[in-house]
Amino acid sequence: MRCFSFSVAPPELEAEDQETLALLRPLHTEMDQTYELVQQFAQMLRTRTGEQLDAWLEKVRASQIRELQGFVAGVERDKKAVKAGLTLPQSNGLVEGKVNTLKLIKRMGYGRSISLPPPTRSSRFVEEKECRV
């Protein structure tokens, strides 16, 4: 069984994943609705249209999809920061990456992490993908 992300834009999905999505969406109305809501949120992220957040939150509340209700509660707790993240071009991604690297080095020093070979110029960034079913 393959796993793909609902947040990936449809043109970027592999052909097999597009077929799976086309089969599943008509079978389950809740899945179709969830897919649409996640795509709308992903579009807000891509286009930095945070002004649409309130309308999107109302749609999610009206949907009564339990898994998304928890997400909405988290967004509501820090709504101002979420709206800024969806609207402003500034990002703290670079800083978060450095903090993550420092934490890894610290864990390695305490022996709580796997040991990695010394970084080379070509391996500056390591990317891991995880698929949860």
Image (cartoon, rainbow, N blue to C red):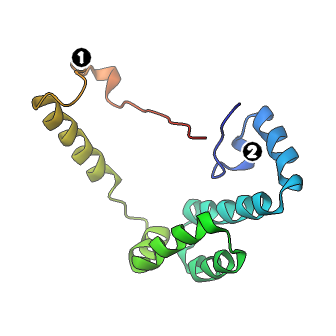
Q: Residues within 10 Å of mark 2 (few under 14, many from 20)?
A: few
**Nearer the observer, 105 or 67:** 67
Residue 36 x %, y % = 74, 63
Viewer-side label of 1, 2: 1
Residue 74 x %, y % = 45, 71
Q: Are marks 1 and 2 in contact (CB under 8 Å)?
A: no
Q: Which residue is mark 2?
A: 11
Left or right? Give the position of 86 relative to 11.
Answer: left
**Nearer the observer, 79 or 10:** 79
- Measured along the vertical axis of the image, is residue 55 above or below residue 10? below
Q: Earlier in the sequence, mark 1 or mark 2?
A: 2
Write the residue at 49% across / 75% down: 73
Write the residue at 37% across / 60% down: 91
**In the displayed image of the protein, which residue is found farthest to the left?**
109
Q: Residues within 10 Å of mark 1 (few under 14, many from 20)?
A: few
**In the displayed image of the protein, which residue is found farthest to the front?**
66
Which amino acid type is shown beneath numbered disc 2?
A: Pro
Q: Disc 1 to disc 2, how far (Cα)?
A: 37 Å
Which amino acid type is shown beneath numbered disc 1?
A: Pro
Circle 1 SS class:
loop
The quarter holding residue 85 reads: bottom left
Write the residue at 32% across / 58% down: 92
Q: Which residue is mark 1?
A: 117
Write the residue at 17% across / 35% down: 107
**Nearer the observer, 31 or 48:** 31
The quarter holding residue 55 reads: bottom right
**In the displayed image of the protein, which residue is found farthest to the top?**
117
Residue 103 x %, y % = 19, 42
